[in-house]
Image (cartoon, rainbow, N blue to C red):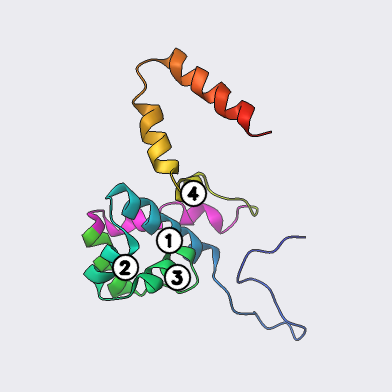
């Protein structure tokens, strides 16, 4: 049986360290909005006073983001703070699977989605979709 990160227990039944699903999702949301705003990890890090490595850790859920830092990030990304928590309500009781927005953290995924959206017709979007689906095997 698969376990969610951060919910494992050692032999004595004590919870082991690791990111919780909410930490992972908040990090993914930070990454999605950072990419949407065209900021690099270095640029975001400079604006909040941390290194790009720290931003990487936030985005991967390796390090939790403190409340004041999260508020700073939301301000810089020009989104309401609650936006960075989108999807966390569903993960507490959901089976282990990636939320749809997790797909957007893949390199170039947001660019692909924007370009797909800008295609002039549904017929063309379907043709592109079929092409991409044929490439996955």
Answer with left or right where residue 16 lies relative to residue 37.
right
Comparing labels 2 and 4, the label whose residue is closer to the camera: 4
Question: x, y percentage for residue 29?
Answer: 40, 55
Which secondary structure, mark 4? loop
Comparing labels 4 and 1, the label whose residue is closer to the camera: 4
Task: Count residues near mark 4 (Cα–Cα under 10 Å), then give few for <14, some for 14-19, many for 20+.
Answer: few
Is 118 placed above or below 79 here?
above
Residue carrying label 1: 26
In which quadrant of the rendered image does the C terminus lie? top right
Asked if the stretch drawn in magenta spans residue 69, the answer is no
Residues under numbered marks 2 and 1 in contact, where contact means CB atoms less than 8 Å apart: yes
Residue carrying label 3: 57
Disc 4/disc 1 C-alpha distance (Å): 15 Å
State the extent of the magenta-drawn residues as a range.
77-94
Query: Residue 70, labelled with which disc?
Result: 2
Question: x, y percentage for residue 105?
Answer: 46, 51
* Mark found first going from the N terminus, 1 or 3: 1
């Amino acid at each position: 049986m698969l376990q969610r990160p951060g919910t494992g227990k050692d032999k004595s039944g004590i919870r082991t360290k690791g990111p919780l699903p909410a930490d992972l999702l908040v990090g993914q949301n930070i990454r999605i909005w950072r990419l949407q705003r065209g900021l690099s990890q270095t640029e975001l890090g400079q604006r909040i006073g941390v290194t790009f490595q720290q931003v990487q850790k936030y985005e991967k859920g390796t390090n939790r983001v403190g409340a004041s830092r999260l508020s700073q990030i939301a301000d810089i990304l020009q989104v309401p703070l609650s936006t960075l928590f989108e999807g966390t309500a569903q993960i507490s009781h959901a089976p282990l699977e990636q939320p749809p927005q997790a797909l957007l953290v893949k390199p170039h995924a947001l660019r692909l989605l924007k370009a797909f959206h800008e295609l002039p017709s549904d017929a063309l979007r379907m043709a592109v979709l079929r092409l991409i689906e044929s490439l996955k095997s």
